[in-house]
Amino acid sequence: MLRTLSIRDFVIVDRLDLEFQEGFTVLTGETGAGKSILIDALALVLGERSDPALVRDGCARAEIGAEFSLERLPQAQAWLQTGDLAEETGMCVLRRVLEAGGRSRAYINGRPATLQQLKELGEMLIDIHGQHEHQSLLRPVAQRDLLDAYAGATALSRQVAQEWREWQELKRRREEWEKNAEALAAEREQLQWQVQELSRLAFSAEEWDALQAEHRRLSHAASLQEAVEYSLEALSEGEAAALAVVGGVVSRLNAAAEYDPRLKESLDVLEPAQIQIQEAVYGLRHYLAGIDLDPRRLQEVEQRLEEVHTTARKYRVMPEHLPQTLVGLEERLESLGGAASAEELQQKEIAAAQAYRKAAERLSRERLRAAAELGKRVTEQMQGLAMAGGRFEVALTPVEAGSAHGLEQVELLVAANPGAALRPLAKVASGGELSRLSLAIQTVTTAVAEVPTLVFDEVDAGIGGRVAEIVGRMLKELGQAHQVMCITHLPQVAAAADRQWQVSKSEVAGKVRSQVRPLERDERVEELARMLGGLKITETTRRHAAEMLGVRRDR
């Protein structure tokens, strides 16, 4: 609900700070005092287009700020969270700055915002009735939401929208599959052939390493044999073989060491060398025995390498990447599915369409029931609001193919006068009629209305007497569930309010200034008397005003 409104240098308001409470509040005052300026200020802070002429004469800018409590507005809290505009206090502050040069700036909780953001958020916070620009009931979406809320079918409506989206997504996928069926079939066929080819190759990264090592060994077998034979000749088999020479040296030094122990140090180095040379000779002889000079095996290895290289060039990858290529082709083939995929998509689409139709038909039944009841009850309310003989109806126009919003379009129709044709609510010409219709609708739907603050302007246009009392009583009842504000010229409406503010204007330093102040009980009697009696207020008028207000006055 609206907590505070701050206005600076706006039209004829220089400085105004207002605090709002729950219940029903009226604003009264002389014609031209500036009552509608408050509505205009609220409209601007809720995203209405600005005009430099609204800046007070001689001022550089006008500024309007409004603070709202969001305790009972989870939808608005979620909207702020989504836009990263929320505050932990549970409050929301909107601010609008209009510069005399024409520039306009908007803020939500101190963060720069667009007018569209102000409008979206504002529609959740305040409904201004009597001004076409801010009348939510003129919007088709609001009319549909109102009927669904009245029917207790808001959750069902969301379910229908979800079922529709799921159906349309499956339909899109099926149509895309059919559109590309020929190309997909060709791709599938190619993939199947490629997977078969690479599977037959049966190639792995481990085999690639082993093949390369074996090829190097087989292709250089003669050189390896020659190198080993030469080494054996030099180490153990030649006339001056190293092993024999070292063995002779060790033998001679062993004998000499008996005469001089200092030779033992050299022996300690040579004896291990003799042993290591012997071990090397054993190893080389074993290696020589195992050297494979099989040209047939070399040919087989070379053929296998050529096969792998040819396949790798074909798929434009390195040989060691062929296994990953096979995995990728298998995954793509699996994602394309087969003939069964098309049938599966079709079955899923049919099931989704049936689920949507079932939910939408249930929603249609709820809407049909609620539309008849809502039309009857609002029509009854209209009879006491200077629209005797008028009719209200909720039209449900079938949508053959359906939509995310169900199987019908929802539109509010009204005939304000006897014999008049029903017309869309958005085409009602009279602001007073529109405002009273809104009052009738809000009274009937008060239990389901989500917007917490309702502002009525021109609600008393063209009415008086008994009808004015009825309007006042309806606004009073509406104020028990909502925060209600109303600008009125009728004492019958003002007397029904929980509190009354007086709007007046005065001249200060040659400039007109508008002021607003709350009235105490005795001041309300005086203001009601002014509204009843005009310029000359008599004691009889004051007694009448006190009687309307329920105040006892001493005679």
Image (spheres, rainbow, N blue to C red):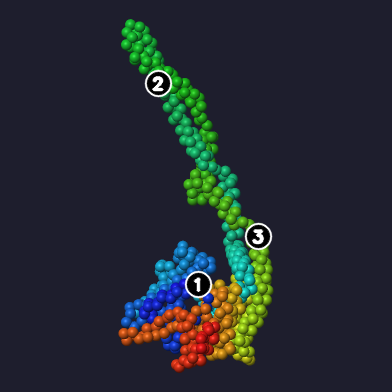
Could you tell me the amino acid type at mark 2?
A: Ala
Give whichever of 499, 525 is nearer the camera. 525
State how far apart marks 3 and 1 are (Cα): 52 Å
In percent of width and height, residue 140 lies at 56, 77
Residue at x 51%, y 92% (from the top left corner): 540
Between label 3 and label 1, give the one nearer the viewer.
Answer: 1
User: What secondary structure is found at the residue carrying circle 2?
Assistant: helix
Is residue 257 positioned above or below 186 on the image?
A: above
In percent of width and height, residue 314 lies at 51, 50
Is residue 546 positioned above or below 343 on the image?
A: below
Could you tell me the amino acid type at mark 3?
A: Glu
Marked residue nearer the N-terminal end (3 or 1): 1
* Left or right, residue 441 beside residue 35: right
In percent of width and height, residue 448 lies at 59, 73
Give whichever of 211, 110 is nearer the camera. 110
Local crowd size for mark 3, using a 10 Å CA cut-off: few (<14), some (14–19), many (≥20): few
Residue at x 40%, y 68% (from the top left corner): 110
Label 3, on which residue? 344
User: What secondary structure is found at the residue carrying circle 3?
Assistant: helix
Marked residue nearer the N-terminal end (3 or 2): 2
Could you tell me the amino acid type at mark 1?
A: Met
Label 1, on which residue? 1
Label 2, on which residue? 234
Give whichever of 366, 291 is nearer the camera. 366
In percent of width and height, residue 321 lies at 50, 46
| Residue 148 found in image quarter | bottom right
* Pointer 3 with pointer 1, Cβ within 8 A: no
Residue at x 56%, y 54% (from the top left corner): 332
* Left or right, residue 63 beside residue 283: left
State how far apart marks 3 and 2 are (Cα): 78 Å
Local crowd size for mark 1, using a 10 Å CA cut-off: few (<14), some (14–19), many (≥20): many
Q: Is residue 118 visible?
A: no
